[in-house]
Image: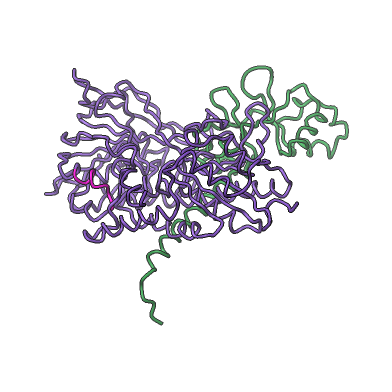
Amino acid sequence: MAAVGTADRPLRVAIIGAGPTGFYAADHLLRSATTVEIDLYDRLPTPFGLVRGGVAPDHQKIKAVTAAFDKVAAHPRFRFFGNVELGKHVTVDDLRRHYHQVVYCTGAQTDRRMGVPGEDLSGSHPATEFVAWYNGHPDYRDLTFDLSVERAAVVGVGNVAVDVARILCRTPDELAQTDIADHALEALRRSRIKEVYLLGRRGPAQAAFTNPEIKELGELADTDITVPAAEAALDDASRASLERTNDRATMKKVEIIRTYADRARTERSRALVLRFLVSPAEVVGDDAGRVTGLELVRNTLVPTTTGTLQAKPTGEHEVLPVGLVFRSVGYRGVPLPGVPFNESWAVILNEKGRVLDPDTKQPLVGEFTAGWIKRGPTGVIGTNKPDAAETVQCMLEDTAAGRLLTPAEPAADAAERLVRERQPQWFSYADWLKVNETEVAKGRAGGRPRVKLTRVDEMLAVAGR
Amino acid sequence: MTIATILAKKGGHVFTVRPDQTIREALAILAERNVGALVVMASAGPPVGILSERDIVRRLVRDEQAFTMKVSELMSKPVISGVPQDDLASAAVTMTEKRIRHLPILDGERLVGVISIGDIVKAQRDEYQGEVETLETQLIEEGRGKVIKH
């Protein structure tokens, strides 16, 4: 019999998760000298993961990466099985019966908690849920956020926190040019929010947002930005650390933030207040269990042995009167049914992308991982490309060495039969392209990139199911 | 990016040796595990030292009896260690300044991993590559549809 990975006997690979990492992994595999057949699964009918459901609607340029993914999907040995969920419609055992290799690229599907009292009061939300809501994720489209309050706090200074603050501060006119979900656009039109606080636990030099992101916050149509001068100033430890690492991008960032220091209000109707060196200590509520404020503790910076500056609470407290709190202190991976998990880092237990047996710490034959569920939620979209390449290299090495699963039903037809049987409402890439066309056409009328379908039923109808 | 990102895909492997083991035993572990240093752990508590290829080579070149010496006699101490929340950049500068190639990572007193200077170089390279990739995609998209005049 021909070796696996040849034209007569292609390497059969299931990729779980159709976000950027899933597509990058597919691309690397299809470009290799090995003949590979790929089935890309996603629990949603729509592909692209956080490019569709996470990247902010007013950042369309970042979404341009999907053009490259469309090219991958057009490959004759690529299939998309959307609306099919691992653990619900298919199991790891099913996959072992149909594929030589399985790659988990499921990302980080939940958020980290702040771990403070009052976190679950009404009006305190994970920022990721707000993001999924305004981006029209079917699982989150029916959430409600009380935008009738005047002040909101966003805890965190990473890109998600910045996105949430910016969306809260944009005017309806600005938002109406984007592909923000219609339900969110309507709700934000009625928003009465006047002040948004963006809270960093460390100083300006340690903030995770990028320079273009912080600059953009100063260029909003109807929002003034400001930062207390004392908090914009660089402390001695941060200055020494910057000089030590000679980090020019961060020096520039500190400079941009300094230009916002104590900026006076203009006639603009909203204010965005950047705060540094504060951590949430408690979400404060009223008798009805609604958020009325956020108690903050001031921090000071203390270096670790390697010189990283960490926040240490001083004991000095203040209460910020806000009616909404969005926590954005990081994403967190969730375990997949039947796949070993490393609780310490909230990732699949792996070495360079090879999934490990938790008892022996040896690789499990034929199981791999890539992206955020492999290394944790870091980097930009493109960071997943070298990450997926590392995993694919392991996959090809194992293929060459014959370390593969031995599927009882390796035919491509058999896998499709399984999917049809378990989930008659599965979505092909052609189905998605119909949804895409419909969305883009709907958007064209209003001068928008697209108008998103946000219910699976609507998507099925458009696909003619 | 933090050290935790590097540890996340190292499978939780940490290669250790006891202070009372011999250099010959330590060399066998180094060779078998294909690593450049071992963390020296007594029965309890934080690491008591670190033993690198260099520590052994420096001694062996002038003393062939070194094979039978105890790990505790050749190890470097005190151990310079990091925490999972350390920034990659700070760790990189510390390792370069102190001329160390392996950094044990402690969570409290618990040893959770070791990162090498090679791990840091690779993580930084992947980070830059990722940013370049993302910027390139955006530039290509911006350029699309524009008429190029010669």
The front one of A336 and A433 is A433
Residue positioned 42% across, 49% down in the render: A47
Q: Does the magenta stretch include residue A246?
A: no
Residue furthest right as drawn: B64
Colour scheme of this structure image?
by chain
Q: Position of residue A402 (x, y in %)?
A: 73, 45
Residue positioned 54% across, 26% down in the render: B107
Q: In this view, does A181 lie above or below B83?
A: below
Left or right of A218? Residue A105 is: right
Image: magenta residue range:
A179-186
Residue furthest left as drawn: A267
Q: Where is residue A223 in the image (x, y as percent from the top left)?
A: 19, 48
Secondary structure mostly taken by the magenta-highlighted segment of the chain: helix
Q: Does the magenta stretch include residue A185?
A: yes
Residue positioned 83% across, 30% down in the render: B24
The front one of B98 and A169 is A169
Left or right of A243? Residue B124 is: right
The front one of A45 and A21 is A45
Q: Which chain is drawn using purple?
A: A
Residue furthest bottom as drawn: B150
Q: Position of residue A84 (x, y in %)?
A: 46, 41
Q: Where is residue A329 in the image (x, y as percent from the top left)?
A: 38, 34
Left or right of A169? Residue B5 is: right
Q: Which chain is drawn using green?
A: B
The front one of A433 and B14 is A433
Q: Is residue B99 above or below residue A119?
A: below
Residue positioned 49% across, 60% down in the render: A74
